[in-house]
Amino acid sequence: MKKHNALKIVAAYAVLSLIWLAISNKVLGFLSNDMEGILILDQYRGYFYVAMSITLLYFAINDMEIKHINKITTLKSKNTVLKQEMDSLRMKLDFNDHANRRLEGYANTDELTRVYNRRKGLELIREQMSQVSALKKSMLIAFIDIDNLKMINDKFGHIEGDILLTSLAKILKDSLARRDIICRYGGDEFLVVLPGACMNDMQGIKARLEAAISKHNTHSSKSYAINISMGFSEYNIKNCKHLEELIQEADDEMYISKRAKKLHYISNFR
């Protein structure tokens, strides 16, 4: 459209120039003996061509500016579209990242108790053992087993057994430090890893957990109480056993505690 307008302007300029040239030549014929008139006519003819050239130049520059403005507008429009696409892509990436984190959480977490599952827990414990060795420090592994969970399941149903498991997991999380690792090792078994702790800290840790469980039982309206048995093992530069050996050592200590309770018959039922 703009190209057609430019062609029209050039054509009009050419026509007007020819008309003016014809008129001026005609007038020159009448003024052939009048030198002053000829000079004045020639001067005005020059003004005419200058005016027409300026007009043509104005339209040409204006056309260039319009094209430039249109290019800028087009670029701005493309930039807006590109920005919208980038924002959309960023939102999709954020959503995918969030979804991946959720999937990773599901893959690493025990569905019932929301603590680490066995696979992830053992992976983190091995990483912690490497750090402890590098820093020449120690850590405690606690093997925790719920007393008489099968009896509670048989008497009150598996839903109550699940409630007991989730309650104990919450007690452990609330009673331990954020850096401590808690994982569900088996059906009624939990592993707790306490970085930086040693056997000298065992009694204090044990007393803290027992006090938290006792407080829960005092305020619980359930017909059963939570009771646990615990065993501990220590990992340090002098006791660089394999993880399986450390777990077995803590498991053995736990069973000693459990057998002592059976001798005194400590019941879970109120």
Image (cartoon, rainbow, N blue to C red):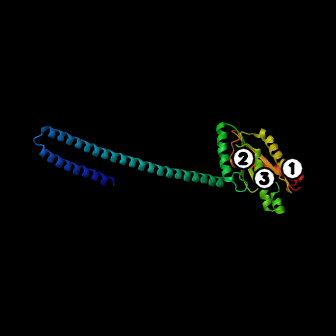
Q: Nearer the viewer, residue 190 or 57?
A: 57
Q: Residue at x 12, y 45 (%)?
A: 30
Identify residue type, mark 2: Leu
Numbered disc 3: secondary structure: helix
- Marks 1 and 3, how far apart at CA: 13 Å
Q: Which mark is residue 218?
A: 1
- Marks 2 and 1, how far apart at CA: 34 Å
Numbered disc 1: secondary structure: helix
Let me know if residue 251 appears in the view. Answer: no
Identify residue type, mark 3: Ser
How packed mark 3 is, by other alpha carbons closer than 10 Å (few <14, some 14-19, many 20 or more), is some
Q: Is residue 89 left or right of residue 226?
A: left
Q: Which residue is outermost to the left?
A: 33
Labels 2 & 1 near each other (Cβ < 8 A) = no
First in sequence: mark 3 vs mark 2: 3
Q: Is residue 45 left or right of residue 191?
A: left
- Marks 3 and 2, how far apart at CA: 26 Å
- Residue under circle 2? 246
Identify residue type, mark 1: Thr
Residue 84: image location, x then y, percent:
50, 51
First in sequence: mark 2 vs mark 1: 1
Let me know if residue 167 appears in the view. Answer: yes
Q: Which mark is residue 167?
A: 3
Q: Residue at x 64, y 55 (%)?
A: 107
Q: Is residue 74 left or right of residue 25?
A: right
Task: Tell us which disc is closer to us: 3 or 2.
Answer: 3
Numbered disc 2: secondary structure: helix
Q: Which mark is residue 145?
A: none
Residue 233: image location, x then y, percent:
75, 44
How packed mark 2 is, by other alpha carbons closer than 10 Å (few <14, some 14-19, many 20 or more), is many
Residue 167: image location, x then y, percent:
78, 53
